Image: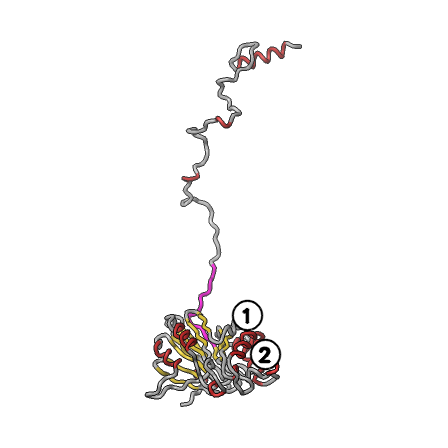
Amino acid sequence: MRTPVVLLLTLVSLACGGAPGGGIDLAGTDLPGSDLATSDLSGQDLPGPDLATVDLAASDLPTADLPAIDVPSLPPTFRFIVVSDTHVQPVDDLRNTVFATSGATFAAFDPAPDFVVSTGDDVDDLFTFPDNIAAGEPVPILHLYRGLIEANYPMPFHVVKGNHDNRFIDTFQGNELPDRAWAEAFAGSPFYPSPWYAFDHRGFHFVALDTTDGATDHATNDTPTILDTQAQWLESQLSTGQPTILFWHHWIPKPADGETPHPILVAIARHKDVVKAAFTGHGHVFATYEWNGVRFFETPPLYGPDVPWHEVECDTRDGSMRIANAAQITYPP
């Protein structure tokens, strides 16, 4: 039974070059070894794609036929609304109702306005609750006013402060408390970031001024004033080179020949090439004039005539503006 085994070993040995009866000598064979660390593969022509030279530019790989994405372009013009003297009351009143329902009215315009600006006397009298002020508490009418905006105006809304927004039941006791009350009521809101501020929209620069800035008593609170700090800030805002539109509350009449213009008008005259228009309120009527090539507009109370607002159209192509609802407005001579 041992003979077949010996014969098999002999045949294996002869096949591998070994002597019959000797051990199997693998030295010098071309069998792959297990010592991979010493395997020298350099220079070998191992098969495989040369990925660095694969040219896919002219390949016949299938491409996905993706649908074209239709990105609507913005129209070259946009519109905004100017209202004024809304005189919101601390109790239910027709003026509050008109102010609230006007938000839906403007939203239904075609085209809809990009934003609304209110040029002052937003509330009827700021401190209709003097006890709240004495106790250092929030002023309810300002929170009511903010709530009416948030609930009824789906577009951005920008607030300018007027003389009624700066006084205590038809008296004036300084700017510190009014400014503090407005800051508290509109904290975290873009509607009223500060007494004067600016914002940009589609290539236009918009500047909101506080013309109660230099008020020292009841009489000066009812007239347009601007102190040096705000005047210097205004100068910087008019130096951006962008087409600019301004807003403030008190109407400033057209200067007569030889009359010294108001400091705001002096700044505008220095930058008449960029200032396109200025909008105010206070006088409760429609009014307009042109001075140094700049148009000035006064807007009546929102609860006044049938169409008591200015609808303004701005053209982003040439930086011009026009009153889109001019046909509905009658200005006094």
Q: Is residue 73 magenta?
A: yes
Amino acid bearing label 1: Gly
Q: Earlier in the sequence, mark 2 or mark 1?
A: 2
- In the image, 273 versus 197, the foreground residue is 197
Residue at x 60%, y 80% (from the top left corner):
134
- According to the image, label 2 marks what residue? 139
Residue 112 seen in render: no
- In the image, 130 versus 325, the foreground residue is 130
Using the image, determine if residue 283 lies above or below residue 195: below
Magenta region? 69-80
The image quarter containing residue 257 is bottom left
In percent of width and height, residue 76 lies at 41, 70
Classed neighbour count for the residue bearing mark 1: other residues with Cα under 10 Å, few (<14), some (14–19), many (≥20) = few
Task: Please indicate whether residue 273 sits to the left or right of residue 82 in the image.
Answer: left
In percent of width and height, residue 295 lies at 39, 81
Determine the secondary structure under disc 2: loop
In percent of width and height, residue 249 lies at 47, 82
Using the image, determine if residue 20 lies above or below residue 261: above
Amino acid bearing label 2: Val
Helix, strand or loop: magenta stretch: loop
Determine the secondary structure under disc 1: loop
Using the image, determine if residue 243 lies above or below residue 172: above
In percent of width and height, residue 279 lies at 44, 80
Q: Is residue 296 magenta?
A: no
Residue at x 34%, y 75% (from the top left corner):
273
CA distance separating discs 2 and 1 = 16 Å
- According to the image, label 1 marks what residue? 188
> Mark 2 near mark 1, Cβ–Cβ under 8 Å?
no
Work out which residue is located at the far bottom of the displayed protein and give it: 333
The image quarter containing residue 147 is bottom right
- Which quadrant is the N terminus positioned in? top right
